[in-house]
Amino acid sequence: MNIQRLFKRLKPGRGAVISIPYFWLLLFFLVPFFIVLKISFAEQDLAIPPFTSLMNLEEGGLLHITLNLGNFDFILSDDFYAKTYLSSLQAALFTTLMCLLLGYPIAYAIARTDPARRNVLLMLVMLPFWTSFLLRVYAWMGLLNENGLINSFLLAIGLVDEPLPLFHNNFSLYLVMVYAYLPFMILPLFSHLVKMDGRLLEAASDLGAGPIKAFFTITLPLSRNGIIAGSMMVFIPAVGEFVIPELVGGPDTLMIGKVLWNEFFDNNNWPMAAAVATVMVLLLIVPIAFLHRFETRQLEGKGNE
Amino acid sequence: MNNQQLSPFLKGMLLLGLLFLYIPIVSLVVYSFNDSKLVTVWGGFSTKWYVSLFQNEQIMSAVKLSLQIALASATAAVILGTIAGFVLARFKRFPGSSLFAGMMTAPMVMPEVITGLSMLLLFISMQQLIGVPAERGFFTIWVGHTTLCMAYVAVVVRSRLLEIDQSLEDAAMDLGARPLKIFFVITLPLVTQAIASGFLLSVTLSLDDLVMTAFLSGPGSTTLPQVIFSKVRLGLNPEINALASITVLAVGVLVIVANYLMLNSQRKRERALAAAMRESNAS
């Protein structure tokens, strides 16, 4: 690959090209995390902005640094936060598993249709993804409501005597989470499954493997990367989901994204919101690093072709 | 893998999945024509909510602002994202490349309450230090959306660049073209389609973003998702149904047209390639 050699020789130009997006991301993505960390050690204050500064230069050149560990102490000692983090992880895990169980057969079916119809099916799955997330969540409000479409239908056909409690509880939360994140699972799965060589399955069947055995010994292991990518794409953002618990969740729904939002917008407690965010980043850093390592490996694998 | 008959189980799952994806959307559209204010109680056919939607000045000015932000962020995201995608696909290893790839992946999955809060705190700190940005509004939202969208553009451009044959760029270089010229004459035209879909994706992401925008917007800059959110928080609203139907229609037409154009150009390319092969075989 001589073009790469050329790029290597052109050090200054190359550096300039890299530095444009690099500095943008450093400034607007990485640096902010350290500011969040810093402000999580501040105290709420009646000022603009509403927090104390950590460093004060006093008379006589004395630099005073005040670190307030109270926010983290509160998160660790108050049961409420532990419960909320746990139930957020649980909701994200449930969403990921359900998306996988639902999304895998769908992605598999699309990958196995003939190319002409495959494009149409893929477009049909993509279309909701392009439509507004907020409006798709809103749509469920009209379906799950006490006098919404589903309850009206069940009452009309006489299956139930009174409206089922479908709305503003954990059922509606989980259902809409799965609904909203399903396309994020189907796409990576599809792009891996479609590359699979169909002859492998034919060979397996010639050698006497049943379809179930062929699936578990060939298809599933070969789509492992798609499963990992799709699961991470669903799990990580789902942990911090705010819109869905806010609009369709119940009063006893505990989601950490909602807690952060309330601390910031309702209590105006920015340091507490920063502390909640810091702990969330610490929880998510392992799955994010996992996704990143996995993507880099894939990238390098492709580059060696 | 193709041309195999789908088993009844797979057919059923496909149908079930599509129903699951579309029933809510169809119900939104149907009830947007409901005369009753109660949205889910049918009171006869009416288009009055569309009329009142277009007369709602709050919604219309939010639409205008959201479109401006979306176009501005998508433009910036396409420029930055294309460079980033190019760097990731062609430079491979350089000092800090791992960190760079990581910062490229993370914005796509990081919960937006975190990115929104962190970016806001950055702007507050910048304001304290250097006085810029003076207030929250168009500029801060634009930076936030650009950062989010450029990651998506970079992924699309990178995977396209990894697909295409690098020998074209190599050949141009052997013929003495300078790298910048190679990029603009050879590389860029080959990834136009990826850039176009990256642009469209950025526009829709920006138009749809609520959480990050809520942190980054100021009192004078209320975007469309913020208006929608404040309304639907209070319950069902027939005007929002009308708005949703228009969105679905617009997105549907856009996706179908884009898909058609893409398939068409793909077929044209294949035909041209086949013709070229025939000619070279004949001579």
Image: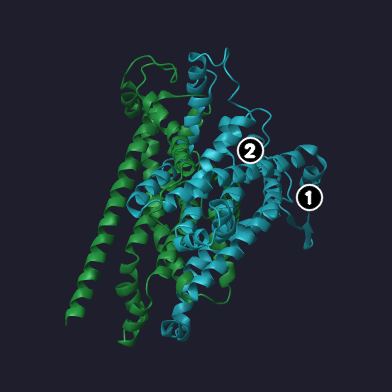
Chain colours: A cyan, B green
Asked whether A68 or A234 is in front, the reply is A234
Structural crowding at the residue carrying mark 2, measured as other residues with C-alpha within 10 Å and reported as few (<14), some (14–19) or many (≥20) = many
From the top left corner, tell me how far across and down residue A150 is, in percent: 50, 23
Mark 2 belongs to which subunit? Answer: A
Q: Amino acid at mark 2?
A: Lys
Location of the N terminus of chain A (image quadrant): bottom left
In the rendered image, residue A129, in percent from the top left (x then y), is placed at 44, 44
Residue under label 2, please give it: A258
Q: Is residue A25 above or below residue B128?
A: below
Res A293 label: none
Q: Are marks 1 and 2 on the same chain?
A: yes
Write the residue at 47% across / 81% down: A12
Parent chain of label 1 = A
Left or right: residue A265 versus residue B80 is right
- Badge 1 amino acid: Asn
Of circles 1 and 2, the one toward us is: 2
Q: Which SS class for mark 2?
A: helix
Q: CA distance from mark 1 to mark 2?
A: 24 Å
- Can residue A49 be seen in this snapshot? no
Give me the residue at 42% from left, 33% from top: B25
The structure residue drawn at horizontal position 47% and vertical position 22%, both measured from the top left corner, is: A149
Question: Is A138 located above or below residue A39 in the figure?
Answer: above
Marked residue nearer the N-terminal end (1 or 2): 1
Q: Where's residue A51, x and y in %?
A: 69, 46
Tell me: A106 left or right of B178: right
B253 and B154: which is toward the camera: B253
Q: How many numbered marks does the figure carry?
A: 2
Viewer can see residue A271:
yes
Residue situated in front as seen by the camera: A252 or A70: A252
Q: Is residue B162 above or below residue A44?
A: below
Name the residue that disc number 1 marks: A68
